[in-house]
Image (cartoon, grey):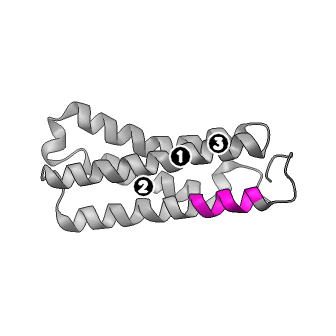
Amino acid sequence: MINRFEDLEVWKLARVFVVDIYEITNKNGFANDFRFRDQIRASAASIMDNIAEGFERDGNKEFIQFLYIAKGSSGETRSQLYRALDLKYIDEEQHKKYLDKVTVISKQLSGFINYIKSSENKGKKYK
């Protein structure tokens, strides 16, 4: 039984991913590209924040809605990682590493959404 969003594995992965994004955006071309740096940081942070916010809402329907928003933010971050690669702010190795991490998060969100949708506790908060 999950009682806190901090216990969700997908939230834990998203939390680590945000730290990774902050670390890479403190270097290279990101240092002077403030708008892009802030945008990729915000989209990465949005993943973990929407998981948390949805968990704290009342009921599975709202939780699922916020998980979809988190999944959308993971897609946005993936797109931004391609831009960072194209602008040479990150190299191929970094790109693959972070793309793999955010893809795992996105897949876990999809699985979690499907699990909650099929749950017998349709009207109750997932715990």
Amino acid of disc 2: Phe
* Residue 110 highlighted magenta (yes or no): yes
Name the residue that disc number 3 marks.
65
Q: Which mark is residue 17?
A: 2
The spot of residue 13 in percent (x, y) is: 51, 59
Look at discs 3 and 2 and give the one toward the viewer.
3
Name the residue that disc number 1 marks.
70
* Residue bounds of the magenta highlight: 109-117
Label 2 environment density (alpha carbons within 10 Å; few <14, some 14–19, many ≥20):
many
Tell me which numbered mark, 3 or 1, is placed earlier along the sequence. 3
Q: Callout 1: helix, strand or loop?
A: helix
Label 1 environment density (alpha carbons within 10 Å; few <14, some 14–19, many ≥20):
many
**Left or right of residue 34, residue 101 in this image:** right
- Asked whether 99 or 32 is in front, the reply is 99
User: How many tags in the picture?
Assistant: 3
* Residue 35 highlighted magenta (yes or no): no
Q: Callout 2: helix, strand or loop?
A: helix
Q: Could you tell me which residue is drawn at 26 percent across and 38 percent down?
A: 37
Mark 3 to mark 1: distance in Å?
A: 9 Å
**Left or right of residue 95, residue 49 in this image:** right
Q: Could you tell me which residue is drawn at 14 percent across and 48 percent down?
A: 28
The spot of residue 94 in percent (x, y) is: 24, 63
Quarter of the picture containing the C terminus is bottom right
